[in-house]
Amino acid sequence: MRHLLEIDDLTPGELEHLCELALAPPESLGAPLAGRGVACVFTKPSARTRNSTEMAVVQLGGHPVYITNDEVGIDTRESAEDVGRTLACYHATICARVHDHRVLERMAALDLVPVVNLLSDAGHPLQAIADVITIRAELGSVKDRVVAYVGDANNVARSLALAVGYLGGEMRITSPPGYGFSATDADRLAAAGVPLVVAERPEDALRAADVVYTDTWTSMGQEAEREQRLRAFEGFSVDERLMGLAPAAIFLHCLPAHRGEEVAASVIDGGRSRVWPQAANRLASIRAVLAWLHQGS
Ligand code: CP
Ligand code: NVA
């Protein structure tokens, strides 16, 4: 039984294989989910992840069921384990977006059906797969490319660092004091064989970068910290001046974006932005993962 809670649940070779599957014509993947359901559990809002997941299930011949936490009440109405056992009675896979990553781990530990992380406080692996597909499509390969991540060392950054490192790229990150990767994060990256370059200032991270990437300064669930974070991240906005330090770089952002905060409108809406192909690649990413999990099943 395989689960995808974070990129390091895969080997680098499996990530390569998922990229190939993602780039394959959808019809070549067949209908491995024919007559089967996929539970799509969301305890937080979503535009890209919900729509791409539901449409990927349809393209693979299955039926997605969108489920909010108001209905299933994870650990309030019943335990995460009982929610997992229930959904496994009807569905071939449980895909879930949760606040607490441990909920995914508890459902996966049942080993009843594959569990896929649709974003947790810890990681966002489907986003990272879409990101590396986008870099490959735009720049030819991830190998030896420099991805400069400016901002919060959050769920998106963790998965991105693993995916870029697995494919032979260099992840550089620059964050304000207190918002960088923890020692635990650094240990996990090291255990995965992924080198990480930490730069103190955005100016140092961006030189000769091939990709400039940022994400919101305030993730879902951190709203109470918004004012404090706005102050802490001053100087970390990706604007024309910073992009000028990486004259050949494309710009990526997982979205949703906050123009005037982590990115200037002129950058995200400008000629070097590839955020819409990146968003489109979310469909190829989840389709590849579901096809891989259900090949031959
Ligand atoms: N990037 C991403 O996961 O977007 P949503 O929150 O809209 O799904
Ligand atoms: N880091 C953001 C990503 C949203 C797709 C969050 O967790 O809210």
Image (spheres, rainbow, N blue to C red):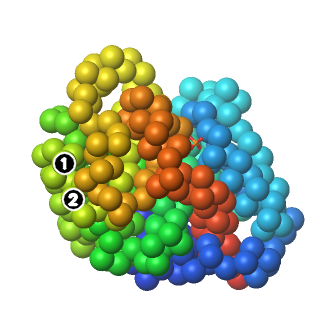
Q: Circle 2: is it few (<14), some (14-19), or many (20+) Cα within 10 Å?
A: some
Task: Name the quadrant of the N terminus.
Answer: bottom right
Q: Is residue 65 left or right of residue 140?
A: right
145 relative to 53, above or below: below
Instruction: Give the residue at mark 2.
Output: 207
Residue 101: percent from left, percent from top? 43, 44
Q: Are marks 2 and 1 in contact (CB under 8 Å)?
A: yes
Q: CA distance from mark 2 to mark 1?
A: 7 Å
Asked if residue 220 shows in the view, the reply is yes
Q: Is residue 259 left or right of residue 160?
A: right
**Residue 216 in sight from this viewpoint:** no
Q: Position of residue 286 (x, y in %)?
A: 62, 62
Q: Which residue appears at 62% of the width and 73% of the height?
A: 22
Q: In the drawing, what numbered circle is on residue 203? A: 1
Is 202 drawn above or below residue 143 in the view shown?
A: above
Distance from mark 1 CB to nearest ligand 2 atom below 8 Å: no
Residue 157, horizontal then vertical, whole percent: 35, 51
Amino acid bearing label 1: Glu
- What residue appears at the point 35 percent right and 43 percent down from the top-left corner? 240
Amino acid type of the residue that numbered disc 2 sits on in the rendered structure:
Arg
Asked if residue 210 lies left or right of residue 76, the reply is: left
Quarter of the picture holding the C terminus: bottom right
SS class of the residue under badge 1? helix
Q: Residue furthest right?
A: 35
Residue lying at 41% horizontally and 49% vertically, measured from the top left: 156
Q: Is residue 136 left or right of residue 175?
A: right
Query: What residue is shown at x 57% (from left), y 80% (from top)?
Result: 20
**How far across and how far down the image is residue 207, in percent?**
21, 59
